[in-house]
Image (cartoon, rainbow, N blue to C red):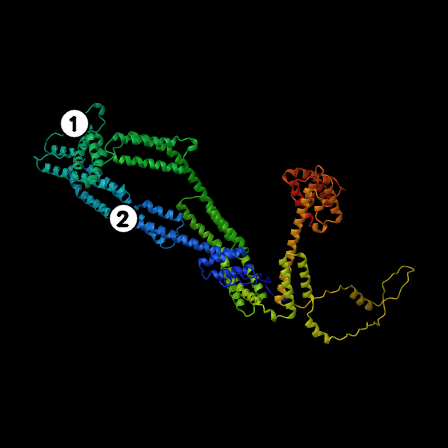
C-alpha cells in the first residue's frame, strides 16, 4: 500500500483521452464526479455553441448524469431564451400595432398585458417594458377623457335645468341671470371643444361621443330658445303692440302689465273639482313644452347628413321630458322621421316599457332563484349594479315610468338584502382578520422583546419565517386597513429581524474572510490538506450556526469551494502525470505487467484464468526484486548467536503444583523463560513486499478490484444457471440432469444432492404446499397473496412445536419434498426464489 497522502485516491478508469476532453477542459478524464462537474461549470463560462453543448451532453449523459444535468440546464436556458425572444418580438409587434393605430381599443390594450404574461413574454425587459408603460399611459388618458365626458354631460343637464327654472319665474329675473348663463354656456362649449380636439378622442368608447353631442345639441337648443323667448319678452314689455312671448308665465306677466286679465288665473276655476289638487297651469305647460318638439323635428328633417346625429340627440333629449304629452299623430310622425334619419329605435314608448318589464323580471328572478343555484354575494351585487345601469340607460332615451320603476326598485331592494347579509358577513370576517393581524403584530413585538440576542439563530429565522407565513394566511381585510396594518407589521418584523440581520452581517464578513483564506491556500506552492480540512470545518460550523438566504448561501459556498477545487484538480493532474514505464523501478514495471495480465484475464471471463492471474499478481507484489537481492546479498554477514543472559538474582517465588505430596521441580528463572515464551507465542509476520510507486499501486489495485467484480459476476451467473438446470431437471424428472455439487455451491453436500436425486427418481407425489411454505419462511422471501393465510397458520403451528426442527434446519429435506411432487410453473418460480438466498448463505 502506498503511504503518499492524497485526498481522492480513485484513479481515472479510462486511460485513452476522449475526443471532447480538450474541448471541456478535461471533464471526461476527471477522476470524480465533483471534479467533472467543476470542469463542466468552468467550460460553460466560455459560452460554448449549441452544437458543442449537444455533443457534450450526448456523451456525458452516459458517463455522469449529474454533470450532464448542468449541460442540459444550459441548453434549456438557451432554448428558453430563444423562445422568449420570439415571444417578445411577437408581442412587441402587437403592442406597436395598437399604439400606431388611429384609435386604441382600451379592452385590447388591457388584454395585451394579460395575454402576454400568459404566453410567457418577458414583460420586465425591453422593449416590452417600455411598450407596456406606453399602453398604460394611453389607456389612462382615454379613461380620463371618458370620465370628463360624463362630467360635461351632467353639467349640461344642470345648465338646462337652470334655464327651465328661470322660464317659470319672472322675466326680469331671467334678464338679470342671462349674463351669468351666457358665460357658463360658453365655458361648457369650450370644455367640450377641448375634449373633442384631444389627440386620444378617436379612441374613446363609441357610446361617449354621441352622449357629448346629444348634451351639446340639447343645451344649445334650450339656450337658443331661452334667448329668443327673453328677447321677445323684452320687446313686448317695451312695445304694447309687439306679440306676446311663447313662454306662458312671461306672456301672462306682460298681459297683466298691460292691464289685461291674467289667463292663468282665469283658467284655474275651470278645472274639475276632482283635480283640484293638481297645479293649475300643468296642462298648459305640458302642451307648450310638447309643442317645442315640433321645431326640433323640423330641424331634424332639414338638417344635412353630417349633422343628423346632433339633431337626433337633441330631439331625443326633448322627447325624454315632454314626449308623453304628444298627440298620437305627432308621435307617429316623430317615430317615422327618426327611422328615416337612421335611428333604429325610433320613438316607441311602449317598447321601452317592455324592456323595463324584462329588467323587472330579471330582478325578481335574482330573489327567487332555487337553493342550489343561488348567486354569491359579490356576483349578486354585480348583477344588481348591471340591472340598475341598464334601467338608467333606458331612462336616458325615454320618459320615465314611475310605476314600473317602483316595482323594479322593490325587486332590487329585496335582492339587495342578500347582498347586505353578505356584506355584513364580510365585514365581520374582516374585523376578525384585523383582530388576528393585530394580535400577530403584538406577538411579534413580544417575541422580539423576549429575544433581543437569540442564541439559536436558526430557530429565530424559523420563527420569523413562520410569522411571515401566518401574516400571509391571516385573511382578507380592506385596502386601507391593510395599508395601516402592513406598516405596523413591517416595523414589528424589522425589530424582530434586527438581531438576526446583525448576526448575518457578521457571518458574511467571516465567510468573505474564509473565502480569501481559501484563495490564499489554493495559491500556495504546496497545498496544505490539513489546513484545507480545518477551513472547511470552520465553514460548516459557521453555516450551521448562522442561517442565510439559500441562494446567497449557495453563491458564497460556490465562491469558497471554487479555488480549493481548482487546487485539488491541479494536484490530481500532477499526480496523474505518471512517469513513463521505462523510467519506473524494475519491481514497479513487473507489477504493472502482472496487472495488465490480470485485466486481460478479467476480459476473458474465465474464472480459473482470473484466479491464476490474481495469484500471480499477489506473488509479484510480495516478491523482492532480484536486483535488490543481488545488491544486498554480498553485504550480509552471519550474526553470532547471543547467549542468554543469566540472572544472578535468586528466585523468590515459583509457580507450580503446591498440593501436599507433590514433587517440586527446579524452577526456571523467569527472566530466561519469559523471552523464549514470548517468541514462541508471537505469530509469524507475513512477508511484505517493497513499497510500490503510485502508478504501480493504482494499477494493481484497479486490476484486483476488477477481478473480484468479475468473479462475483461469474459466480452469480453460475448460480443462476445451476438453479435453471435444477428446475429443468424437476420439470423433466430427470435425475441425471441435476447439477453437480460443485455447481450447486458449498451449501449442498453430496448427501443432500443424493436425496434430491432419489426424490427426482421416485414417482411424483400429490402436494408439497407445506414444504414450499417452510422454504419461504427459512429464506425470508415473500409468499404469493393466495397462500398468505396458509403461511400465517403454519407459523402459528411452528410456535407450538418446541422441540421440532426449524425451517432453517430442514430446508434441504423440504427441497427434496418439493422435487418429489408434481411440477408446475407457479411452484417452480417459488422454488427458484427461495433457493437463490438459501444456496448463498
Label 2 vs 1, first from the N-terminus: 2
Residue 664 lies, with reference to residue 201, above or below; the image says: below
> SS class of the residue under badge 1?
helix
Q: Which mark is residue 102?
A: 2
Q: Position of residue 2 (x, y in %)?
A: 64, 66
- Residue ranking furthest to the right: 661
**Residue at 65% in and 38% down:** 787
**Residue at 24% in and 31% down:** 348
Specify whether residue 780 is in view.
no
Q: Position of residue 222 (x, y in %)?
A: 19, 38
Front-most of residues 723 and 777:
723
Residue 193 lies, with reference to residue 403, above or below; the image says: below
Label 1 belongs to which residue? 267
Q: Residues within 10 Å of mark 2 (few under 14, many from 20)?
A: few
**Residue at 35% in and 54% down:** 127
> SS class of the residue under badge 2?
loop
Amino acid at each position: 500500500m502506498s503511504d503518499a497522502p492524497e485526498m481522492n485516491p480513485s484513479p481515472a478508469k479510462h486511460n485513452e483521452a476522449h475526443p471532447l476532453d480538450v474541448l471541456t477542459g478535461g471533464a471526461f478524464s476527471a477522476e470524480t464526479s465533483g471534479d467533472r462537474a467543476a470542469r463542466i461549470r468552468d467550460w460553460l463560462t466560455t459560452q460554448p455553441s449549441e452544437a458543442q453543448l449537444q455533443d457534450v451532453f450526448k456523451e456525458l449523459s452516459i458517463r455522469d448524469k449529474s454533470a450532464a444535468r448542468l449541460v442540459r440546464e444550459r441548453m434549456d436556458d438557451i432554448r428558453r431564451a430563444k423562445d422568449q425572444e420570439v415571444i417578445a418580438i411577437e408581442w412587441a409587434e402587437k403592442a406597436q400595432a395598437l399604439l400606431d393605430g388611429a384609435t386604441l381599443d382600451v379592452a385590447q390594450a388591457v388584454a395585451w398585458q394579460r395575454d402576454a404574461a400568459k404566453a410567457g413574454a418577458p414583460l420586465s425587459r425591453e422593449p416590452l417594458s417600455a411598450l407596456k408603460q406606453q399602453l398604460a399611459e394611453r389607456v389612462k388618458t382615454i379613461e380620463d377623457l371618458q370620465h370628463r365626458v360624463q362630467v360635461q354631460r351632467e353639467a349640461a343637464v344642470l345648465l338646462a335645468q337652470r334655464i327651465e327654472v328661470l322660464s317659470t319665474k319672472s322675466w326680469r329675473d331671467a334678464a338679470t341671470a342671462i349674463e351669468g348663463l351666457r358665460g357658463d354656456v360658453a365655458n361648457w362649449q369650450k370644455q367640450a371643444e377641448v375634449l373633442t380636439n384631444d389627440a386620444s378622442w378617436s379612441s374613446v368608447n363609441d357610446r361617449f361621443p354621441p352622449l357629448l353631442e346629444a348634451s351639446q345639441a340639447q343645451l344649445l337648443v334650450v339656450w337658443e330658445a331661452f334667448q329668443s323667448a327673453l328677447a321677445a319678452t323684452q320687446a313686448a314689455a317695451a312695445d304694447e303692440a309687439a306679440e306676446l312671448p311663447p313662454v306662458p308665465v312671461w306672456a301672462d306677466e306682460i298681459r297683466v302689465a298691460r292691464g289685461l286679465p291674467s289667463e292663468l288665473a282665469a283658467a284655474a276655476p275651470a278645472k274639475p273639482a276632482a283635480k283640484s289638487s293638481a297645479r293649475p297651469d300643468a296642462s298648459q305647460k305640458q302642451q307648450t313644452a310638447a309643442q317645442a318638439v315640433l321645431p326640433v323635428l323640423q330641424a331634424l328633417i332639414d338638417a344635412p347628413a353630417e349633422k343628423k346625429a346632433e339633431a337626433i340627440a337633441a330631439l331625443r333629449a326633448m322627447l325624454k321630458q315632454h314626449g308623453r304629452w304628444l298627440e298620437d299623430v305627432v308621435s307617429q310622425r316623430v317615430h317615422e322621421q327618426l327611422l328615416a334619419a337612421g335611428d333604429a329605435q325610433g320613438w316607441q314608448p311602449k317598447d321601452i316599457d317592455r324592456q323595463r318589464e324584462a329588467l323587472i323580471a330579471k330582478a325578481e328572478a335574482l330573489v327567487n332563484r332555487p337553493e342550489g343555484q343561488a348567486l354569491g354575494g359579490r356576483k349578486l351585487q354585480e348583477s344588481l349594479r348591471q340591472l340598475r345601469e341598464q334601467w338608467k340607460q333606458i331612462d336616458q332615451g325615454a320618459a320615465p315610468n314611475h310605476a314600473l320603476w317602483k316595482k323594479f326598485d322593490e325587486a332590487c331592494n329585496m335582492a339587495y338584502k342578500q347582498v347586505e347579509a353578505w356584506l355584513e358577513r364580510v365585514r365581520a370576517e374582516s374585523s376578525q382578520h384585523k383582530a388576528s393581524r393585530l394580535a400577530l403584530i403584538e406577538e411579534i413585538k413580544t417575541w422580539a422583546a423576549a429575544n433581543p440576542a437569540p442564541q439559536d439563530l436558526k430557530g429565530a429565522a424559523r420563527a420569523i419565517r413562520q410569522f411571515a407565513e401566518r401574516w400571509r394566511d391571516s385573511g382578507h381585510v380592506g385596502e386601507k386597513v391593510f395599508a395601516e396594518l402592513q406598516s405596523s407589521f413591517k416595523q414589528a418584523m424589522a425589530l424582530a429581524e434586527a438581531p438576526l440581520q446583525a448576526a448575518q452581517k457578521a457571518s458574511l464578513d467571516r465567510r468573505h474572510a474564509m473565502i480569501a483564506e481559501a484563495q490564499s491556500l489554493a495559491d500556495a506552492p504546496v497545498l496544505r490538506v490539513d489546513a484545507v480540512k480545518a477551513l472547511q470545518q470552520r465553514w460548516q460550523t459557521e453555516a450551521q450556526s448562522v442561517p442565510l438566504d439559500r441562494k446567497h448561501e449557495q453563491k458564497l459556498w460556490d465562491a469558497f469551494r471554487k479555488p480549493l477545487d481548482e487546487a485539488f484538480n491541479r494536484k490530481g493532474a500532477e499526480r496523474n502525470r505518471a512517469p513513463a514505464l521505462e523510467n519506473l523501478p524494475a519491481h514497479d514495471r513487473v507489477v504493472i505487467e502482472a496487472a495488465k495480465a490480470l485485466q486481460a484475464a478479467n476480459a476473458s471471463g474465465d474464472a480459473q484464468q482470473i484466479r491464476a492471474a490474481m495469484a500471480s499478481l499477489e506473488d509479484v507484489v510480495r516478491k523482492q526484486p532480484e536486483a535488490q537481492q543481488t545488491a544486498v546479498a554480498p553485504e550480509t554477514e552471519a550474526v553470532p548467536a547471543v547467549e542468554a543472559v543469566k540472572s544472578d538474582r535468586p528466585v523468590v517465588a515459583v509457580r507450580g503444583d503446591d498440593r501436599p505430596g507433590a514433587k517440586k521441580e527446579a524452577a526456571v528463572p523467569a527472566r530466561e523463560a519469559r523471552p523464549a515464551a514470548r517468541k514462541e507465542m508471537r505469530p509469524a509476520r507475513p512477508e511484505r513486499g517493497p513499497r510500490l510507486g503510485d502508478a504501480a499501486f493504482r494499477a494493481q489495485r484497479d486490476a484486483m478490484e476488477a477481478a473480484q467484480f468479475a468473479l462475483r459476476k461469474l459466480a452469480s451467473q453460475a448460480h443462476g444457471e445451476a438453479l435453471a438446470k435444477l428446475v429443468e431437471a424437476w420439470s423433466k424428472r430427470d435425475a441425471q440432469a441435476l447439477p453437480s455439487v460443485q455447481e450447486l455451491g458449498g451449501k449442498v453436500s453430496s448427501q443432500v444432492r443424493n436425496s434430491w436425486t432419489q426424490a427426482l427418481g421416485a414417482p411424483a407425489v400429490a402436494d408439497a404446499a407445506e414444504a414450499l411454505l417452510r422454504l419461504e419462511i427459512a429464506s425470508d422471501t415473500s409468499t404469493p397473496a393466495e397462500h398468505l393465510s396458509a403461511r400465517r397458520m403454519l407459523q402459528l403451528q411452528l410456535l407450538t412445536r418446541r422441540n421440532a426442527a426449524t425451517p432453517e434446519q430442514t430446508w434441504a429435506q423440504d427441497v427434496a419434498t418439493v422435487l418429489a411432487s408434481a411440477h408446475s410453473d407457479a411452484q417452480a418460480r417459488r422454488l427458484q426464489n427461495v433457493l437463490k438466498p438459501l444456496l448463498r448463505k
